[in-house]
Image (cartoon, coloured by chain):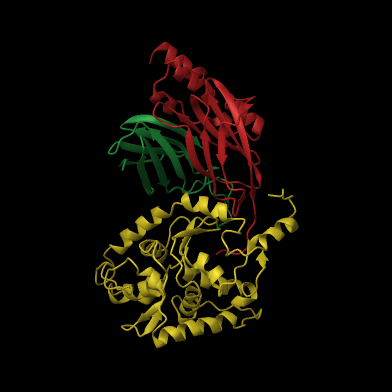
Amino acid sequence: MRRIAGSVLLAGAAMAAPAGAQQQSPYAEYQRMATESAPIELYEIAGEELWKKKQGPKNVSLEACDLGEGPGVLKGAYTHLPRYFADADRVMDLEARLLHCMMTLQGRSREEATKRVFGNADKGSEMELLSAYVAGQSHGLPMRPGNAHAKEKASIELGRKLYFHRAGPWDFSCASCHGEEGKRIRMSGLPVLFKPEYAKPLMSTWPAYRVSTSKIVTLQWRMNDCYRQMRMPEPAFGSDTTVSLIHFMTAAAEGVVYRGPGIKR
Amino acid sequence: MDRNRRTALKSAGTAGALAAAFAAGLLRPQDLLAAGWNKDAFGSKSLADALKGLGAANPADSKDIVIDAPQIAENGAVVPIEVTSNLPNTRSIAVLIEKNPFPLAAKFDFLEGAMPYVKVNVKMGESSNVRVVAEAGGRHYTAVKEVKVTIGGCGG
Amino acid sequence: MAEPMKIRATLKGDAADVRVLMGHPMETGQRKGPDGKIIPMHFIQEVTVKLNGKIVIEGQISQAVSRNPVFSFRVKGAKAGDRIEIGWVDNKGDKNSSTTAIA
């Protein structure tokens, strides 16, 4: 490989290659090695303990939670989300569904269960740990979010609309950063997330261990943080806004084998 | 504790001397633990001082030390470094990040039953040479690999 | 309080691939907390790997090792069912250890 000088500009040219296309990404080797040596399993273990822990006024665990494949069935649950749930009459992603189970099975209030949805390096949040565990149970399976039910189609369509909808004080949409090939922020290439060649390698590695902050990050966190970076009002946890965007991008990754939990910068 | 062992521990300011003492049968495995953390080497702010602290002031270049590390790390907080020493009788492997404020990151002593191999995640403050120093047959050898560290944008 | 720890040891021929995950902040003493004060150094200094009770690897590490360290080692002359025990001691004198059987 041609020796890259310290210049940011020269390195920037290399970064303009699609970040989603793993084989071309200059970070592919790093991602592979760092994923192998990430402490993900510690979070999965902690998540499993939480899944089995009796909590809330009803003092029950989440083990009977139906994530779409039947009560307590974890294999294939994450890879079929987001999907429509009749008992809630809406499309839910993993975290919205976990919240639903916390409220209905465990009798917890929304306020209590979402008091600390995003944790930190010292302590992951319940949602983060549970997400790592549940998602990990679908490792190696193809991702097929719901797309047959009328509300699932509507959810994907809403996600598409929101992806391109400019709003907020900066008039930003997701597409402002993630709408065109060849863009980057510093040395991170910006993936065009509605294109399968970008969506597939990326959606198949959430939730993830974020190395720069030493914590598990989830898609609800990612939506929340992107909205913050766009200076938009904070979306409610598990709202249709966040779920439909996640649904739209997961649909773009349809069929990819789930490789997570992964790592992120 | 017999006199020889106590002397070896007292005079062993470097892990190299410890390993030699161990090889000479003066130390038991537990004594390496008791001897503790090499403050001099780990507290060194220059590569030269760290090498001196390891008792490895002039290591010879060796192609028998294999360093597997990413060419470009997306983030300096976690940089995986994998080291294999093909030098016969490798006693220890030390990993140094030349441009870190304190270059010495880790040192592993291999007693009977261990293969001279290790994979460790290190923090790198900036693009730097990753230098490995191995002790084998009473001498020190070294190899180096450059790892670039970039500054990324938003997360995800 | 024990931080989480997990060992995976698998046999490959007559050598065991050992992978250990350790929860630990590995604070460098150079970071500032949200209150603006320096977070004190807090990191693992010694790592010991034992095969069936006998020390085979002695590691000394610094605050330059990443937070939540993950190490890989290789131990030879091992059989399925042999015990791998890995322990650490940090700069505050806190310790932790875990044992697993080679699979």
Residue A44, image x, y percentages: 37, 57
Give the quadrant of residue C103.
top left
Residue B5, image x, y percentages: 43, 15
B152 and A199: which one is in front? A199
Residue A13 visible? yes
The residue furthest top is: B3
Residue at 57%, 55% in the rendered image: A28
- The mark total stands at 0
Residue at 56%, 45% in the rendered image: C29
Residue at 24%, 68% in the rendered image: A59
Q: Which chain is green?
A: C
Is A68 positioned to the left or the right of A32 in the image?
Answer: left
Give the quadrant of residue B103.
top right
Q: Does residue C24 sit above or below B56 in this rendering?
A: below
Q: Which chain is red?
A: B
Residue A120 visible? no
Q: Does residue A66 sit above or below B153 in this rendering?
A: below
The quadrant the C terminus of chain A occupies is bottom right
Q: Does residue A68 sit above or below B118 in this rendering?
A: below
Q: Which chain is yellow?
A: A
Residue A123, image x, y percentages: 43, 57
Residue at 39%, 69% in the rendered image: A79
C94 and B33: which one is in front? B33
Give the quadrant of residue B145.
top right
Residue A233, image x, y percentages: 56, 79
